[in-house]
Amino acid sequence: MVRFENVGMRYGLGPEVLRDISFSLEKGSFHLLTGPSGAGKTSLLKLIYLAERPSRGAISMFGRDIASTPRDELPALRHRIGVVFQDFRLLEHLTVFENVSLPRLVTGEDESHFRAEVEELLLWVGLGNRLNAKPATLSGGEKQRVAIARAVVAKPELLLADEPTGNVDPEIGARIIRLFIELNRLGTCVMIATHDQRILERLPSTRIFRLGEGRLTTGVAHDHLLSEGKRA
Amino acid sequence: MSSHAPTGLMPADSASGATLHTIVAVMSFLACLALGGVLTLSRLASEWTDGLSGSLTVQLLPSPQISPADQLKEAVRLVSQWPGIFSAKPLTSDDAKALLEPWLGDGKALEGLPMPQLIEVTLTPGQQVELEGLARALADSVPGAHLDDHKRWNAELAGFAASSEAVGWSVLLLIALATFAIVIFATQAGLQTHREIVEVVHMIGARDVFIASEFQRHFLWLGIRGGLIGLVIAAFTLIGSSFFWDGRESPVAAQYLPQLVSSPLYYLWLLFVPAAMGLIAMMTARFTVLRVLGRMP
């Protein structure tokens, strides 16, 4: 589904923030992406959700080589990816319902086609009674769940989440992780960027990507926790 | 340009929208005043030239060869029968004195002077008149008769009107260019505040033309609304000034300036100003959004 081969990335003329990144994500898999702050987790996610271009190497998404894909075909690929941004990026002037509906609206779909689905989704994330609320009136946890609902409303094949538990209390964080596990069981490939140890503890056998100094290593969460413990 | 139902993607009201409204309204007001001025000058020019080219004057200077009464009678007969002449009306000596009063004053100064007799000739509208032949016929048949076809006046007035109109169009062009630049600047500034929307919608898979059409629709209405506000204020100003000159019973304004209120249909052209404002804002928004999106992967 996603394949990176010797990918490097730099912002402008600055130093490379990612170096020789190679990995692949398979359909229905679950991954954690970890590493210290500034290690390049967000940059790697941006490459995956096609918000940045690599400075070298090859990226293939859903069987398409990105470098040779025409720009006007990229929106269709993006539509197959759901993203939960670290800072939510909800549109403040829209209601919860409208924010969640956006990925369906931008493809020209009529609201009558998806209204029931969006309402059901918001019920599922526990916001069935906040359909008409504006983001400014929501708590951090509620905003996070709106962002998750928006990321999954178009039934993406790949779901990316950047520090999804960073702004919420432990109870909400646990609930959010349960949501991701449930989505993964439905067949969505999930990748969560986090440095929250509690997530790793909850998912000890999950495949983990560790970023450090722009390079990627792989392993499982349990081993990573052990090595972190020894280092401490 | 793509067309789809509006999604409400753009906030209906925002601080940048209010600023753009105000700027567009002010520029629209100035453009409407300039266009109103040009239209007034244009109408003035055509009224003057139409008025002069539709009439002639025959002057009858005293001549020893013919009595004044016969001179007048013969001239009126000849002119009236000439093809293309609608009417030939002799002015009384009181009318002639009244015409000279502004220059020579009333009373005694005129009493000793030999007053020329005048015939006011009106042409049949839309019909060609052979003026040179008429002038020759008058000179041959009526001693002391002279035909004045206002050519010199007409040419001077037409020249004055044309140069005034040209100045008016230049001012309007300058205002249009300034408006263009200011509306572009204000639209771009307004778009900066909505950059977050552009980025988010781009990331969730919206096509560039979809995003651009959302923005251009929003800015089209914003431009038209601002333009209409300026138009309404300008209309009040123009109509107000028209009433002001009417109220003062100014002879100059009443006789020579076309009155806005008497010809409102003529000023329908002013409706182009808000339409142009809307189009400028719309196209600026479209190109700016497409340029911003073009820099994104």
Image (tube, coloured by chain):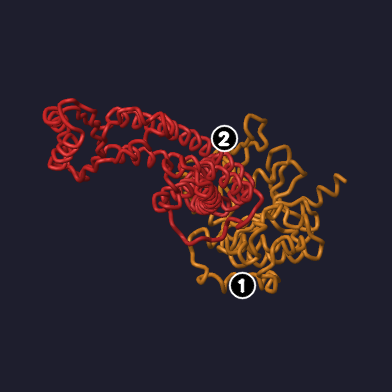
Chain colours: A orange, B red
Identify the residue position indicated by label 2 in the image: A56
Q: Read off the chain for label 1.
A: A
- Label 2: which secondary element: strand
Residue A177 falls left or right of residue B172: right
Query: Residue B212: image x %, image y %?
Result: 50, 49
Residue B168 drawn at (x, y percent)? 45, 34
Looking at the image, can residue B120 be seen?
yes
Report the side of A223 relative to B165 (left or right): right
Q: Quadrant of residue B11?
A: bottom right
Looking at the image, residue B175 sits to the left or right of residue B135; the answer is right
| Residue at 54 percent of width and 51 percent of height | B236
| Residue projecting furthest to the right | A232
Residue type at the position of mark 2: Arg
Label 1 Cα crowd, 10 Å radius (few <14 / some 14-19 / many 20+): some
Closer to the eye: label 1 or 2? 1
- Find residue B51 and report its horizontal and vertical position in percent: 31, 40
Q: Is residue A115 or residue A18 the one in the foreground?
A: A115
- Which residue does the numbered mark 1 point to in the structure image? A119
At 69% from the left and 55% from the top, the residue drawn is A88
Query: Is residue A141 depicted above or below B223 in this figure?
Result: below
Task: Give the residue displayed 44% in from the left and 47% down from the top.
Answer: B259
Q: Quadrant of residue A59?
A: top right
For the C terminus of chain B, the quadrant is: top right
Work out whether residue B226 can be spotted. no
The three-letter code of the residue at mark 1 reads Glu
Label 2: how many Cα within 10 Å (few below 14, some 14–19, many 20+): some
- Determine contact: label 1, label 2, CB under 8 Å: no
